């Protein structure tokens, strides 16, 4: 398909409004296959303003007289307004944006065309290979091994080629366990906590079904986990569904581990909402934050009824529970919900940030995201197809990853010196997860990324972020390595609404000086964050 | 700044820490010494009790009572708990249980404090064991009812600076450019005859004669004539006067609102519906209204060339809040430590905010309808401003909390009595120590390292519920789960980085010096890397 067919206009004169804090930009507007461009002329700064069309979440057009207005609500939660000369031009531009921003094909997306100066293709794809981590764990523990049973993605389409499993379990047993778990997601190691010698595992739900089926290889696998830890070690299965929901799942072929079948393992239920309810919470929050007209009197009630902060609270306290079980109880922990690709990853990745000082470094955090989100098969393409503004009926969208970033932000607020990266890093990750010139967050899992040749045909976000000029924006200047676990408080009094726009560093004079400041969360001004500019 | 709350998983040890933090008053404490004592402080009694800690349950301890404080030290080996409470914070002492009460720890005393906490002690039931503790506490916590002096008059502390000299009205008016051809200084109220709740020295319009003032005084409530707070360039007040009303509720509403705040934070923090419960206390909404009012006042003063007359029914509650906040917004001088002390001294103490009635120093009538947290509300507004403008204030959060603690403690004379004439009568400045002596002799502790002095910068805070937050480090500080880190880690780290920067700059200077010496020496190599040096800049 040719993009040209979808571009219905040449160019038009327009004025761009980017929020209360930035001056309007006037210039020539035009559309390319992937971008909306505004050129204010060579003397202006910046001399070119770019918006990735994939970033557009919803578009609204209005015409009056001989001009029109287009309001673009972006996936990164910016709201932009374009005042365009000419009714026809306005309608053409709106139609072009609509068509181009809703293209679903991965291999025609911008990352496959993005060739920035100074970066070489394939450079950073080996930045954070999880195999390195897995090999290290295998070496340190002697109880775990790297398995390539999933080399062709036949055991589990959402796992990477290499996974780490108990040494005592062979590949054929893995295949059987995979058949017993949803999506083929058999229990694999997520994190080895050296100080207590315990491990964190993740999986999909067991497919016990109404007949309460069992799978001896799956049981052996979990037995081997405890045996590998230390004699008499215990385990906790953190199920991210309520006991009722877990029971109900049996009717549709799922279920949860029967107590008798897994001696030494104890099940704990910590219900976390995912999917539709989480997306709705996100939409309500964005709506509330954007509603500047609304009388402020009932703001706290409204904020509470969005339930976003309760999601943050539940997530953090469940992550604390998992981490505490390992560090203080000396137990192994297996986390799963239903698919094991959403709330499961939230908990395993946050528990690592709490326990592991390495994951709080710049490189360690990127490695964590690569290993626990991207390679672990969080379906980014489905979850981040739309953000909070889209009018399209949500199908698989859910801001699970944003919830993770929010929890990390809360950690950073409570431990302002302990994370090497700052809020800029979290904002960048949020932006790139929804729309990015880089290939890192494309597709839903490794299998799809292999089919699309993402690694050889697109640039990695990690190489983009490693540029010195980017690094300055991403680092926490106050960082001091902290060798201890950082236990966050999940009390509601300790949590704050993540207001997005990074506050000015205290040593620079405060922007808050102007009387009109507000800048809540969601109306953040355009910044030069788009690395394609 | 950053409250770093901690996990529930190790709350026990934190409880001890958080309670130990009550020793924030600069008293030197020797570990071997069982009881800290101020000069002039006398030990009255001690007793073995069970302290019923709302967070960790009953703890056996020995309580010491002096004429200034109640001090409790744990007698249990696994607990280092210490309570150190000035008797001035006590608002009410109640007996709980009777001689025949059953149940463990059901007999004892329940002490309600003005700083949003309760202390409960259980005693042995036999022999009316709580009677003398009750009587002694009542006697020394409420000295007014027993014809005893307030502790501030017994305190013999010596400081190397005298806080009473911080505020000198003539000097302060001179700083503001007063008197000038619009305003003059008058001593008409020298013996507090014109208005007993006003200070002796007043600034009034130039053209208003003392005779005029006497006539005006009879017309205003309690003879409070209009006088300048922050004097600003202006035309005659009486022409083109514009009235605007700020919809702020009365002192009783404020008192009830604070009570509701206590209900949701002490001893247990409301969890399931925290935000809506917080909203239903209306505390933040009142803060919002006060700030909104102050912004309007400041805006009127700074935008037009108009003066503003601020008044409420009596002119000593809302008025003080609005004028002092507006002055804080307009005049950067008041954002320094000394400036803020002068502001409090002038707009609150000197102009007759009724501290004695609102706080009830040494008074046992805990239900007195005159009590109201007006000054606390002002300090909360200041804290909200300091959150929104982290670089604009010379003082830190600890400074504000220290002021609030000594608002109640009765260790200093600063907040005693209702007006200047009463203070003069009691010779407060001669017979008591000023709180500013304590603070100014140890200023570093109260400094905000992010402070950047900016003359003439006007601050308008955002008074919207979206930008106001509950001051957790103050209102929930007794809860061990909300741990306040002292010193603040961000402030501390920032100081370290500043020191590091200074060191690098020094080394850079030395290198440049050495290098230029080398360059002027013809034998030195010409290819030295000196070109890179002069352009190094730091990013702070």
Image (cartoon, coloured by chain):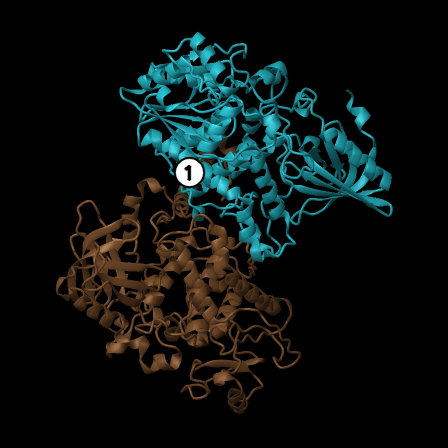
Say left or right for B13 vs B402: left
- Rendered hue of chain A is cyan
Chain in brown colour:
B
Which sits in the foreground, B509 or B207?
Answer: B207
In this view of the protein, can residue A369 be seen by the observer? Answer: yes
Which sits in the foreground, B411 or B273?
Answer: B273
Within 10 Å of disc 1 (Cα), the crowding (few <14, some 14-19, many 20+) is many
Q: Residue at x 83, y 32 (%)?
A: A9
Which sits in the foreground, A475 or B43?
Answer: B43
Q: Residue at x 54, y 12 (%)?
A: A153
Where on the picture, by quarter, is residue B259? bottom left
Which sits in the foreground, B526 or B480?
Answer: B480
Q: Residue furthest front?
A: A211
Task: Report the residue marked by disc 1.
Answer: A317
Horizontal and vertical percent for residue B446?
A: 38, 57
Horizontal and vertical percent for residue B333?
A: 48, 64
Say left or right for B193 vs B79: right
Read off the chain for label 1. A
Q: Residue at x 50, y 26 (%)?
A: A249
Horizontal and vertical percent for residue A185?
A: 49, 19
Which structural element holds mark 1? helix
In this rendering, the answer to whether B384 lies above or below A349 is: below
In this rendering, the answer to whether B4 lies above or below A249 is: below
Q: What count of labels does the image hold?
A: 1
In this rendering, the answer to whether A305 lies above or below A255 is: below
Where on the picture, by quarter, is residue B67? bottom left
In this view of the protein, can residue B523 be seen by the observer? Answer: no
Horizontal and vertical percent for residue B72?
A: 21, 57
In this rendering, the answer to whether A325 lies above or below B119 is: above
């Amino acid at each position: 398909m040719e993009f040209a067919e979808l571009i219905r206009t040449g160019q038009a004169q327009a004025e761009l409004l980017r929020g209360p804090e930035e001056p309007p930009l006037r210039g020539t507007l035009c559309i390319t296959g992937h971008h909306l461009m505004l050129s204010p002329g060579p003397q202006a700064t910046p001399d070119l303003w770019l918006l990735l069309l994939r970033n557009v979440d919803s578009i609204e057009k209005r015409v009056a007289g001989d001009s029109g207005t287009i309001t673009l609500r972006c996936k990164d939660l910016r709201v932009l307004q374009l005042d365009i000369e000419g009714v026809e031009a306005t309608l053409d531009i709106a139609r072009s944006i609509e068509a181009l921003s809703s293209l679903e094909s991965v291999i025609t997306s911008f990352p496959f065309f993005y060739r920035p100066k100074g970066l070489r293709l394939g450079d950073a794809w080996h930045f954070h290979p999880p195999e390195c981590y897995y090999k290290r764990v295998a070496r340190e523990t002697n109880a775990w091994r790297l398995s390539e049973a999933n080399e062709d993605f036949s055991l589990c389409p959402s796992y990477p080629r290499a996974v780490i499993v108990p040494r005592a379990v062979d590949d054929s047993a893995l295949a059987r366990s995979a058949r017993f778990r949803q999506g083929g997601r058999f229990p694999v190691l997520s994190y080895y906590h050296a100080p207590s010698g315990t491990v964190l595992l993740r999986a999909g739900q067991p497919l016990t079904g109404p007949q309460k089926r069992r799978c001896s290889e799956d049981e052996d696998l979990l037995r081997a986990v405890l045996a590998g830890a230390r004699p008499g070690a215990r385990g906790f299965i953190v199920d991210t569904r309520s006991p009722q929901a877990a029971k109900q799942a049996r009717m549709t072929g799922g279920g949860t581990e029967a107590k008798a079948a897994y001696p030494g393992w104890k099940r704990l239920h910590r219900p976390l909402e995912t999917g539709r309810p989480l997306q709705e919470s996100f939409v309500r929050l964005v709506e509330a934050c954007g509603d500047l007209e609304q009388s402020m009197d009932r703001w706290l009630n409204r904020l509470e009824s969005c339930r976003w902060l309760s999601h943050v609270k539940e997530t953090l306290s469940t992550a604390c529970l998992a981490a505490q079980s390992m560090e203080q109880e000396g137990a192994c922990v297996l986390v799963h919900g239903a698919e094991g690709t959403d709330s499961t990853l939230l908990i395993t990745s946050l528990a690592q940030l709490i326990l592991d000082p390495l994951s709080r470094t710049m490189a360690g955090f990127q490695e964590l995201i690569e290993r626990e989100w991207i390679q672990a098969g969080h379906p980014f393409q489905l979850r981040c197809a739309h953000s909070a503004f889209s009018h399209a009926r949500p199908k698989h969208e859910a801001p699970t990853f944003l919830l993770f970033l929010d929890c990390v932000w809360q950690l950073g607020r409570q431990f302002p010196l302990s994370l090497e990266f700052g809020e800029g890093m979290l904002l960048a990750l949020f932006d790139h997860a929804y729309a990015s010139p880089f290939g890192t967050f494309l597709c839903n899992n490794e299998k799809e990324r292999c089919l699309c040749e993402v690694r050889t045909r697109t640039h990695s976000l990690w190489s983009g972020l490693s540029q010195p000029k980017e690094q300055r924006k991403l680092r926490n200047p106050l960082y001091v390595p902290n060798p201890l676990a950082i236990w966050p408080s999940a009390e509601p009094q300790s949590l704050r609404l993540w207001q997005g726009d990074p506050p000015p560093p205290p040593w620079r004079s405060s922007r808050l000086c102007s009387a009109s400041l507000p800048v809540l969360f969601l109306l953040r001004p355009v910044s030069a964050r788009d690395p394609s500019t | 700044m950053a409250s770093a709350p901690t996990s529930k998983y190790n709350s026990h040890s934190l409880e001890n820490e958080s309670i130990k933090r009550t020793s924030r008053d600069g008293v030197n404490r020797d570990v071997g010494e069982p009881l800290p004592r101020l000069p002039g402080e006398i030990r009255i009694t001690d007793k073995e009790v069970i302290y019923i800690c709302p967070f960790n349950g009953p703890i056996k301890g020995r309580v010491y009572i002096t004429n200034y404080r109640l001090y409790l030290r744990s007698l249990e080996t696994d607990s280092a708990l210490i309570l150190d409470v000035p008797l001035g914070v006590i608002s009410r002492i109640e007996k709980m249980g009777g001689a025949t009460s059953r149940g463990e720890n059901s007999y004892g005393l329940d002490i309600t404090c003005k700083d949003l906490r309760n202390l409960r002690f259980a005693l042995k039931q036999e022999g009316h064991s709580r009677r003398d503790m009750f009587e002694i506490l009542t006697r020394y916590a409420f000295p007014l009812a027993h014809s005893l002096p307030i502790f501030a008059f017994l305190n013999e502390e010596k400081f190397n600076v005298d806080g009473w000299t911080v505020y000198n009205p003539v000097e302060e008016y001179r700083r503001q450019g007063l008197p000038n051809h619009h305003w003059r200084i008058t001593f008409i109220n020298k013996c507090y005859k014109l208005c007993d709740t006003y200070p002796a020295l007043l600034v009034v319009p130039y053209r208003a004669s003392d005779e005029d003032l006497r006539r005006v005084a009879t017309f205003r409530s309690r003879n409070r004539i209009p006088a300048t707070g922050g004097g600003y360039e202006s035309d005659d007040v009486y022409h083109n006067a514009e009235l605007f009303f700020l919809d702020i509720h009365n002192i009783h509403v404020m008192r009830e609102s604070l009570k509701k705040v206590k209900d949701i934070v002490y001893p247990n923090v409301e969890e399931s519906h925290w935000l809506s419960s917080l909203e239903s206390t209306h505390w933040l909404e009142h803060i919002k209204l006060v700030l909104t009012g102050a912004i309007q006042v400041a805006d009127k003063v700074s935008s037009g060339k108009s003066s503003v007359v601020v008044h409420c029914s009596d002119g000593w509650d809302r008025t003080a809040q609005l004028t002092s906040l507006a002055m804080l917004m307009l005049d950067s001088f008041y954002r320094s430590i000394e400036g803020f002390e002068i502001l409090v001294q002038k707009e609150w103490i000197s102009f007759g905010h009724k501290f004695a009635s609102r706080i009830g120093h040494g008074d046992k009538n805990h239900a007195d309808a005159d009590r109201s947290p007006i000054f606390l509300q002002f300090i909360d507004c200041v804290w909200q401003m300091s959150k929104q403008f982290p670089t604009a204030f010379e003082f830190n959060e600890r400074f504000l909390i220290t002021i609030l603690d000594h608002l109640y403690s009765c260790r200093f004379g600063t907040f005693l009595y209702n007006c200047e004439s009463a203070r003069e009568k009691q010779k407060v400045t001669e017979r008591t120590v000023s709180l500013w002596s304590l603070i100014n002799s140890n200023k570093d502790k109260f400094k905000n390292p992010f402070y950047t002095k900016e003359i003439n910068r006007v601050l308008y805070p955002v008074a919207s519920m979206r930008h106001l937050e509950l001051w957790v480090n103050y209102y929930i500080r007794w809860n061990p789960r909300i741990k306040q880190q002292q010193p603040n880690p961000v402030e501390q780290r920032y100081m370290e980085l500043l020191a590091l920067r200074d060191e690098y700059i020094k080394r850079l200077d030395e290198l440049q010096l050495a290098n230029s010496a080398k360059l002027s020496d013809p034998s030195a190599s010409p290819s030295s890397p000196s070109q890179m040096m002069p352009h190094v800049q730091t990013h702070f």
